Amino acid sequence: MSTAQATPYGSRAAALVLLMLPVALYLLVFVYPLTSIISLSVDNSGLSKRFQSLSSLGSDASADQEAAALLADFRAMDKKQLGEAARMLNQQRSGFRSLVMNTGKAADEIAPTMAALVAFDDRWADRSYWDIINANAAGVTWKYYQRALGIKADTKSGASAQAGDDMYLRVMGRTLTITFQVTILTLLIGYPLAYAAANGSPRVSTLVLTVVLLSFWTSVLVRTTAWVVLLQTNGLVNNILVGLGLVSQPVQLIFNRFGALLAMTHVLLPFAILPMLNVMRTIPASQSDASRSLGAGRIETFLRVYFPQSLRGVAVGGGTVFILSLGFYVTPALTGGPEDQMLAWFIADFVNKTLNWGMASALSVLLLGMVAFLVAVAGLARWAAARQNRRDA
């Protein structure tokens, strides 16, 4: 009687080939974009390549040497390169665009001395303009992270943080606040619905699941727009409130924090309900029956038997909602006010309007770092709790 090989080489090769496809897809759609974003957040080659003559000067260069090198760099740039350099410098200080464009166009006519440069435009006498150009001489820069963290780098005083420079830190704090609020609301609303779907009659369970899935399958933009229509001053909700005499005039329910929280909670509610429902369905009904037979009431049975076992679903649903809401853009942009926009709105603004890819990448990396930190804290807390349970056992 013949026996087959336990581990044929053909099976190993086939398994390796099948494994390469998901690995390649993972590298293409996740690792490569992430690496590109990180590199863009510190990349300064667009400016450093434009001022090679100026960056090659030593620290002991005279003012006339700096002026001559700057004019030489301007002459070496074509119109497109000059405009790109002017745009990127203008992102760091307003007025730089006109200064660079005007000087660059007249570079052939200006004598290579500091006096001639200042005579053409007296802003060149301001050393801060030179400091900004010299700070962009290196191919790698931390200026985007410094701006995102509210840190100003000065050649004389070094790094400093002043009041009013922490705008993006406050936006990050606002993003976390809104995210926590939405997560709590979705869990408070979603838990009873998941409980009803898991333990209710077939009719109730079918009704809840139908409503949840219909909401889940509807476009985020459609659901968000529906809330804008319902909550506006002449919308259905305000008309009902005024008609019932509950308010004398329409209430501002949209384009503020209330509208953003309401719409985001509605959009993300299915992501909280479905994980909790899956866990609740695995809890044997016999455990609750046994608790009741031993004399425990409904509330005690729920609190001591059912609820602790459902916490795994609460953690998964809450974590999913939390991660998704951190990067929300469309819903708060349409339903929130100016003080309710989250970090994703500013990232999109840098990409679409100001074309500041470096700043958008830096904010994206900081958002990713914030998520990784929170996940690490949650994992550490879970590990500590499991270790404590083992000790108690």
Image (tube, rainbow, N blue to C red):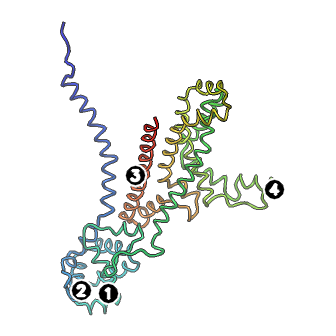
The answer for how far apart the CA atoms under marks 1 and 3 are is 44 Å
**Is residue 138 shown above or below 365?**
below
Residue 233 image point, x, y percent: 69, 59
Mark 3 against mark 2, which lies toward the viewer?
3
The answer for how far apart the CA atoms under marks 3 and 4 are is 49 Å
Residue 163 image point, x, y percent: 47, 75
Amino acid, disc 3:
Ala
The answer for how far apart the CA atoms under marks 2 and 1 are is 9 Å
**Is residue 121 shown above or below 87?**
below
Amino acid, disc 4:
Gly
Q: Which residue is mark 4?
A: 245
Q: What is the secondary structure assignment of the residue under circle 3?
A: helix
Quarter-of-image position of residue 67: bottom left
Residue 318 image point, x, y percent: 52, 45
Closer to the chain start, of discs 2 and 4, is: 2
Closer to the chain start, of discs 2 and 1, is: 2
Q: Which residue is mark 3?
A: 372
Q: Which residue is drawn at the image coordinates 27% and 32% (left, top)?
A: 18
The answer for how far apart the CA atoms under marks 3 and 2 are is 47 Å
Closer to the chain start, of discs 1 and 3, is: 1
Amino acid, disc 1:
Trp
Amino acid, disc 2:
Ala
Closer to the chain start, of discs 3 and 4, is: 4
Q: Which residue is mark 1?
A: 124
Q: What is the secondary structure assignment of the residue under circle 4?
A: loop
Q: Are marks 3 and 2 in contact (CB under 8 Å)?
A: no
Mark linked to residue 67: 2
Quarter-of-image position of residue 205: top right
The answer for how far apart the CA atoms under marks 2 and 4 are is 74 Å
